[in-house]
């Protein structure tokens, strides 16, 4: 005779017992898995994973501090006690904004400032027109009858390529990589010339490279560590690893590119003068007039034409120190306030300045549209950025 099935209540109790046993087995398995997780702070015995994650965060903070120090030192200048209203002119040499940009650690702006110096000295004209798609195109027009020096020709060839153009008007190359290579080589040659003159040390410091390599290596450790700990539910070491990732990423963004070119003691007087020039560029209008009217100033009674001629020549150095937007606005106000007699006295300078102001207005219009290319009000650097991406290609 077939045995009868157990009553239904007995079957239900057996099912519940099996379910409870399975739940206990799953709990034991999860506990064992957490105990085997090296990043779980609750595992026993305690293996010190929280201090390891904290050490990653502390190392990230140290590297960020080193990156900030390197960024400050890259553009730090000896303090000048007076404001200077004229560029530094070495013995038997004219003032050169490209060399000054390298000496103050702002070589990313050196070529743009050098091109603008050619425009403000009347060697070339910057011309802007609208392309078929409505985009502003900036070109360089060689001024008839002006003989370029070898240094000026080298700068133009770095932007447009070697050889003399048949046409008088040249536009920036569309090959961004080729332009970037030529510009890098040009800046390196100018830095080598400064080294031969004893203004730069033969070899720069590799501290920036050390910080970058250390940050990348730690980032390769911190990213998977943060992912594993957060997925496993180990929130304390996970948060520390995530903080380390953030600190390392910020450090890589802050650290200046390339190697630091270290000026020598012979360059201190020039760098101090450049700091005084930076102070003059950032002064208010009334303070600048007081500097010009001082016993060491250029003018006892500076008129609008004389003051404008001085300020217009400083526009390339305003690009170097990153105050081109404010300096262009200052020049525009001074230009608008001049009467017909003053404008006629300026002569060709007025025409050149009008071209620069028109380019600034056109590029400023693009800023209003979409901030697509960055800070375009600074004619020098931003014209290059539109046409050839020169800044992006620099190390």
Image (cartoon, rainbow, N blue to C red):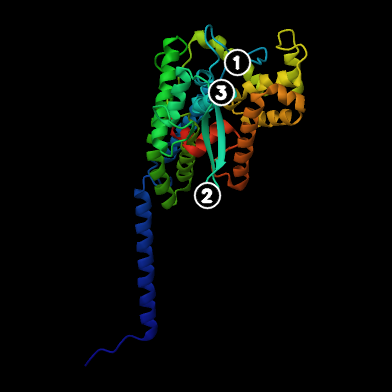
Q: Nearer the viewer, mark 1 or mark 3?
A: 3
Q: Nearer the viewer, residue 59 or 96?
A: 96
Density class for disc 1 (Cα within 10 Å; few <14, some 14-19, many ≥20) is many
Q: Residue at x 61, y 25 (%)?
A: 315
Alpha carbons under labels 3 and 2: distance apart: 30 Å
Query: From this viewpoint, is residue 86 visible?
Result: yes
Q: Nearer the viewer, residue 165 or 279?
A: 165
Alpha carbons under labels 1 and 2: distance apart: 40 Å
Q: Nearer the viewer, mark 1 or mark 2?
A: 2
Query: From this viewpoint, is residue 214 visible?
Result: no
Alpha carbons under labels 1 and 3: distance apart: 12 Å
Q: Which residue is mark 1?
A: 87
Q: Quadrant of the C terminus?
A: top left
Q: Position of residue 259 (x, y in %)?
A: 42, 24
Q: Which residue is mark 3?
A: 117
Disc 1, SS: loop
Question: Tag 3 or tag 1, which sits nearer the N-term?
Answer: 1
Numbered circle sitting on residue 133: 2
Q: Residue at x 38, y 51 (%)?
A: 34
Indicate the quadrant where residue 260 lies. Answer: top left
Disc 3, SS: helix
Numbered circle sitting on residue 233: none
Q: Is residue 256 left or right of residue 27?
A: right
């Amino acid at each position: 005779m077939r045995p009868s099935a157990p009553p239904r209540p007995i079957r239900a109790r057996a099912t519940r017992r099996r379910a409870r046993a399975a739940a206990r087995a799953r709990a034991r398995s999860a506990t064992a898995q957490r105990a085997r997780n090296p990043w779980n702070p609750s595992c026993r015995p305690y293996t010190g994973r929280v201090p390891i994650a904290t050490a990653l965060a502390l190392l990230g903070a140290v590297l960020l501090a080193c990156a900030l120090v390197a960024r400050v030192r890259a553009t730090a200048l000896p303090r000048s006690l007076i404001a200077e209203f004229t560029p530094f002119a070495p013995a038997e040499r004219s003032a050169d904004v490209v060399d000054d940009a390298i000496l103050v650690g702002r070589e990313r702006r050196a070529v743009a400032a050098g091109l603008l110096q050619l425009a403000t000295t009347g060697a070339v004209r910057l011309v802007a027109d609208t392309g078929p798609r409505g985009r502003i195109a900036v070109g360089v027009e060689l001024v008839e009858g002006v003989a370029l020096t070898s240094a000026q020709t080298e700068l133009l060839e770095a932007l447009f390529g070697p050889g003399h153009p048949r046409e008088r008007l040249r536009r920036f190359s569309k090959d961004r990589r080729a332009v970037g290579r030529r510009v890098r080589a040009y800046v390196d040659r100018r830095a080598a010339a400064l080294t031969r003159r004893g203004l730069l040390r033969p070899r720069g410091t590799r501290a920036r490279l050390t910080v970058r390599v250390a940050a990348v290596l730690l980032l390769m450790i911190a990213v998977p560590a943060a992912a594993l700990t957060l997925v496993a539910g180990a929130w304390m070491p996970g948060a520390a690893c995530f903080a380390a990732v953030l600190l390392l990423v910020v450090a890589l963004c802050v650290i200046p590119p390339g190697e630091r070119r270290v000026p020598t003691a012979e360059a201190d007087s020039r760098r101090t003068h450049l700091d005084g020039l930076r102070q003059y560029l950032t002064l208010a209008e009334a303070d600048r007039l007081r500097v010009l009217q001082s016993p060491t100033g250029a003018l006892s009674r500076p008129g609008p034409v004389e003051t404008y001629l001085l300020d217009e020549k400083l526009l390339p150095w305003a690009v170097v120190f990153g105050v081109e937007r404010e300096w262009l606005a200052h020049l525009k106000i001074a230009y608008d306030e001049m009467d017909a007699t003053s404008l006629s006295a300026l002569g060709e300078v007025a025409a050149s300045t009008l071209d620069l102001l028109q380019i600034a207005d056109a590029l400023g219009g693009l800023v209003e549209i979409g901030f697509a290319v960055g800070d375009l009000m600074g004619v020098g650097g931003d014209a290059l950025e539109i046409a050839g991406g020169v800044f992006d290609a620099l190390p």
